[in-house]
Image (cartoon, rainbow, N blue to C red):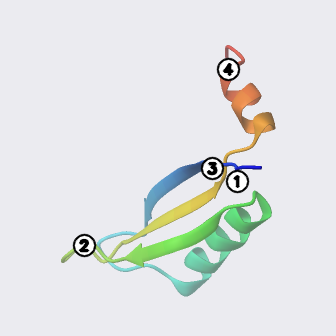
């Protein structure tokens, strides 16, 4: 029996301002994403921005595929 290939969906968001990003905002964003099944795979600061960009992934399930196919 062949192993099924895992498929992922990704989420990228930049938060904060030119004045910086508060730890509380980073933590609340990561907590919220974690509750939705997202796992942060990279966090970086765009050069000279004071902001941070979070890259996350979660397993693409049949339920998520169906939700995406429903017209808004």
**Label 3: few (<14), some or many (≥20) within 10 Å?**
few
Q: Which label's residue is closer to the chain start, 2 or 3?
A: 3
Please tell me in which quadrant of the rendered image residue 17 appears.
bottom left
Instruction: Please name the residue shown 63% across and 79% down the image.
Output: 27
C-alpha gap between disc 1 and disc 4: 26 Å
Q: Which label's residue is closer to the chain start, 2 or 4?
A: 2
Percent coordinates x, y for residue 5 in the rendering: 63, 50
C-alpha gap between disc 2 and disc 4: 36 Å
Instruction: Please name the residue shown 72% across and 64% down the image.
Output: 32
Seen from the viewer's position, the closer of residues 6 and 2 is: 2
C-alpha gap between disc 2 and disc 3: 37 Å
Q: Nearer the viewer, mark 1 or mark 4?
A: 1
Percent coordinates x, y for residue 13 in the rendering: 46, 57
What quarter of the picture does the C terminus occupy?
A: top right
CB contact under 8 Å: marks 1 and 4: no
Q: Secondary structure at mark 2?
A: loop
Q: Where is mark 3, residue-wise? A: 5
Please tell me in which quadrant of the rendered image residue 43 appears.
bottom left
Q: Secondary structure at mark 1?
A: loop
Q: Nearer the viewer, mark 2 or mark 1?
A: 1
């Amino acid at each position: 029996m062949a192993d099924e290939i895992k498929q992922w969906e990704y989420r990228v968001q930049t938060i904060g301002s030119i004045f910086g990003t508060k730890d509380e905002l980073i933590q609340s964003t990561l907590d919220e994403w974690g509750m939705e099944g997202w796992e942060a795979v990279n966090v970086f600061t765009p050069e000279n921005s004071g902001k941070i960009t979070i890259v996350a992934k979660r397993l693409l399930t049949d339920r998520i595929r169906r939700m995406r196919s429903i017209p808004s």
